[in-house]
Structure formats: C-alpha cells, structure tokens
C-alpha cells in the first residue's frame, strides 16, 4: 500500500490517502462515463483519507450505495465514496507520485461502449507534438 497526497486543480481541496492500493480498477458504467466523459480509472484508498478544504467539496448521491465528491470551485473529480463502509475510490490521475500501478479489474465490462477498447491501435502524440499542434491551431 502506498501513501500519497493530492489536490484539486485550484488547490482549495487537498487529500492525503494513507493506504492506496496500486492495483487500480476501471469502471465502464454509464454513471462513471457521464461523470468524467470516460471510464473511471480509480485507486482504492480505504478509509484512511484526510481531507483539507471539505467546505469546498460538493457531494452528489449518484446511487443508493455511494456518493461522488468534487471541488465546487474548479470541478475536479475527487472521489467515489461508499456509503456503508466509508471507503474511498479516487481517480488515479489525482496522485502524481504513485509507482507500480497495475490495472487489476474492469467493472461493468458489459457496459463498455464499442468505440473504445484498451487494446485499440490508435495514433499517439507526445506532449511536445500536442503543444505544437495547438500552437498552430489557436
């Protein structure tokens, strides 16, 4: 288990998670895809989560069993929290210093739309290539 810190884009919410499981999950359900525009890549963080700036978090009861939290100022998706256990699943991308990450499981695989698959062969662009593209097209 890893220990890591994260924050939302504007810095109004900071999170310290003590027990992050490096075996992350991916959820393809309609709710997760609508929330972030893509499947939800999540690390399980258990209940040892410390949040500063909670007054900046908006909670949304997205199902009977869980709620989602996001920053009211910048909109950063912060967590999916199970009501019964209080356990948090958080976006992998919130934590920039995690090592040894491994995709372990995909949830609602029967709900994955046909337009993506993690084995798709696609064009790939580096950061430099993307920056050059937008510089030419702005």
Image (cartoon, rainbow, N blue to C red):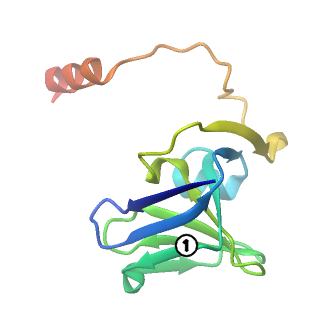
Near mark 1 (Cα within 10 A), the count class, few <14, some 14-19 or many ≥20, is some
Residue at the image position 36 percent from the left and 72 percent from the top: 13
Which residue is at the front of the view, 105 or 115?
A: 105
Q: Where 56 falls versus 8 (above or below)?
A: below
Q: Which x, y percent locates residue 20?
A: 60, 56
Q: Nearer the viewer, residue 66 or 99?
A: 99
Q: Quadrant of residue 52?
A: bottom left
SS label for mark 1:
strand
How many numbered badges does the structure rendering display? 1
Outermost residue, bottom direction? 55
Query: Could you tell me if residue 58 is visible in this image?
Result: yes
Against 6, residue 81 (above or below) is below
Q: Nearer the viewer, residue 9 or 20?
A: 20
Q: Where is 75 relative to 112, above or below?
A: below
The residue pinned by badge 1 equals 49
Q: Please report the residue visible at 34 percent of the width from the left and 19 percent of the height from the top.
A: 126
Residue located 73% across and 51% down the image: 29
Tell me: 74 left or right of 2: left
């Amino acid at each position: 288990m890893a220990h890591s810190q994260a924050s939302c884009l504007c810095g109004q919410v900071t999170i310290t998670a003590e027990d992050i499981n490096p075996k992350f999950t991916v959820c393809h359900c309609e709710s997760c895809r609508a929330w972030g525009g893509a499947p939800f890549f999540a690390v399980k963080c258990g209940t040892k989560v410390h949040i500063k700036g909670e007054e900046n978090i908006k909670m949304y009861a997205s199902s009977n069993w869980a709620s989602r939290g996001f920053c009211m100022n910048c909109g950063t998706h912060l967590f999916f929290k199970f009501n019964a256990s209080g356990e948090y699943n958080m976006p992998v991308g919130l934590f920039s210093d995690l090592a040894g990450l491994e995709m372990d499981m995909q949830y609602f695989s029967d709900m994955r739309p046909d337009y993506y698959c993690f084995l798709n062969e696609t064009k790939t662009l580096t950061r430099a290539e993307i920056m050059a593209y937008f510089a030419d097209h702005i």
